[in-house]
Image (spheres, rainbow, N blue to C red):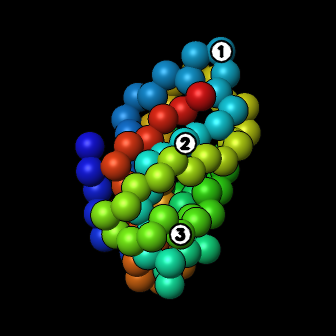
Amino acid sequence: MFAGSFDGGDSLAFRSVDFGTGRTSLSASLAVEPAYAGQTFEIRIDDPAGPVIGTLTTSPTGGWTRFATQSTTIASTTGMHDVFLVATGGAGVANIDWVALE
């Protein structure tokens, strides 16, 4: 999967994610230009405006095509949920290569 050019207000949906008996972290491979670092993705469940279970603040990776794994903790969540990554901030939040719950 690759999703690029995320700006504040953009979102990415993952439908019917099985959290099983509990997931407590989210990792993502992100590419972030240094001048745009420090913006965030809210991790929300069930709806793009649903409960926030975590926030990932981006770190610089050296450019829009240089990916690095970045992680954050999330509230322990169980069962089946739709998951939304909602970009907050201005333009150029990040490019995303992959996302994983752990």
Residue at horizontal 56 percent and vertical 51 percent from the top = 70
Which residue: 64% across, 27% down? 23
Residue 36 sits above or below residue 42 on the image: below
Q: Which residue is mark 2?
A: 27
| Real-space Cα separation, disc 3 to disc 1, in angstroms | 33 Å
Q: Earlier in the sequence, mark 2 or mark 1?
A: 1
What is the spatial separation of the Cα atoms under label 3 and label 2, in whole angstroms? 15 Å
User: Mark 3, residues whose alpha carbon is within 10 Å: few (<14), some, or many (≥20)?
Assistant: some
Q: Is residue 9 visible?
A: no
Judged left or right of residue 82, residue 21 is right
Q: Seen in the image, is 79 located left or right of residue 16?
A: right
The image shows residue 92 at horizontal and vertical percentages of: 40, 77
Label 2: element kind: strand
Q: Residue at x 58, y 66 (%)?
A: 59
* Amino acid type at mark 2: Ser
Q: Position of residue 69 (x, y in %)?
A: 51, 47
- Measured as percent of width and height from the top left, residue 81 is found at 50, 32
Q: Amino acid at mark 3?
A: Pro
Residue in the foreground of this view, choosing between 50 and 23:
23
Spatial CA distance of label 2 from label 1 is 18 Å
Tag 3 near tag 2, CB within 8 Å: no
Residue occupied by mark 3? 60
- Could you tell me which quadrant the C terminus lies in? top right
Residue sitting nearer the eye, 79 or 8? 8
In the displayed structure, 23 sits above or below 53; it is: above
Q: Residue at x 55, y 75 (%)?
A: 37
Residue neighbourhood size for the residue with mark 2, other residues' Cα within 10 Å, grouped as few (<14), some (14–19), many (≥20): some
Callout 3: SS: loop
Q: Can you identify the residue that label 1 sits on?
A: 21
Q: Amino acid at mark 1?
A: Thr
Asked whether, in this view, residue 54 is left or right of residue 90, the answer is right
